[in-house]
Amino acid sequence: MLKDRIITAIALVFFVLCIFNYLDDLWFSIVLCGFTLLCISEWKLLFYEHEPKWLRNYTFFGSIFYFLFLVLEAPSLFTSQIFLNPPKAVDISFVGVFFIFWLFITPLIIINYQNKLRWRRLTLESPLMNFFVLTFGYFLFWGTGIILLILRNDIYSVLLLFSIIWSADIGAYFFGKKYGKHALASEVSPGKTWEGVFAGVVASIITTFLVIHIFREFLGVDYLLSTIPTKYNDLSEISSTQIILLSSVTVFFSIIGDLFISVVKRHAGKKDSGGLLPGHGGVLDRADSLISGSFGYIICLMFILQPVVLL
């Protein structure tokens, strides 16, 4: 089991580096759309064993729109609106929907399931909440794809993102397995412990310092998001506090995403979302931390890179 996990993880690292380094924008968008569709297909099966016709049509037309958006609109739209200009109120409100979901709605769903409070409106047994979570999941996957597209032309920002998430996963897994005694959420994910969370955060912080040091001293990298250099993403200007904040916020969001997907899987009565990746389960099992962690990462970069203008 552990051997399969390690082999699959190494293959995934190699695959990710290849698609970010060697594919042009069109092929990258095609691969990104394929990845999103794999996540969506596994997501749907956690809610419906046999896919309803309306959901099939929703996925088909939504995927066509999403692909066209990736190829034609996303790069220029998000680059100009988010990074070349300070965020305006409309940008904050758009991002705020996802922020509220990850920081308020999702934790309430997790706490409700963990403590068996069964607040009717916060359980997946509720038809309204079930439909909301199912539908919003589409936007979460599509949004992750857009974030990866934003980072597409800056391999160092991508490497830092994956280094933070992977180091946290590795640190939490091995330290929690050996020393973990206090369950984080026993009803949601029995294997996760507070000791593992602490180790994951510490591992991610150390990794972030190390990776940024390597970027600066050995690779001559001066900027994160180097395609849009400003004084706010100059690596020489980023303080230790900002580095700790970036890694900690990313890991915090990744843990929430991991627990949230676990709640959905438990509601569906499934251990894994699929069986495509040996030792890991499905694509969604491996991408759950990335879906939420990438959002925390890009949010933190937005606030580190430039001041927020609300008016």
Image (spheres, rainbow, N blue to C red):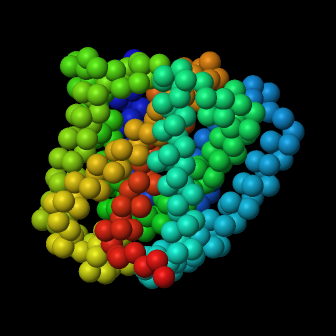
Q: Is residue 39 visible?
A: yes
Residue 84, image x, y percentages: 44, 81
| Above or below 171: residue 299 | below
Q: How many marks?
A: 0
Residue 219, image x, y percentages: 19, 65
Given the current orientation, which residue lies at the most extreme right position? 53
Q: In the shown orientation, is residue 227 left or right of residue 57?
A: left
Quarter occupied by the N terminus: top left
The image quadrant that residue 131 belongs to is: top right
Q: Residue at x 17, y 54 (%)?
A: 209
Q: In the shown orientation, is residue 163 left or right of residue 65?
A: left
Q: Nearer the viewer, residue 284 or 199?
A: 199
| Above or below 287: residue 181 | above
Q: Nearer the viewer, residue 185 or 79?
A: 185
Q: Residue at x 29, y 56 (%)?
A: 246
Given the current orientation, which residue lies at the most extreme left position? 217
Q: Residue at x 80, y 27 (%)?
A: 50
Residue 47, image x, y percentages: 70, 30
Q: Is residue 34 visible?
A: no
| Above or below 137: residue 31 | below
Q: Residue at x 29, y 49 (%)?
A: 248
Residue 279, image x, y percentages: 45, 24
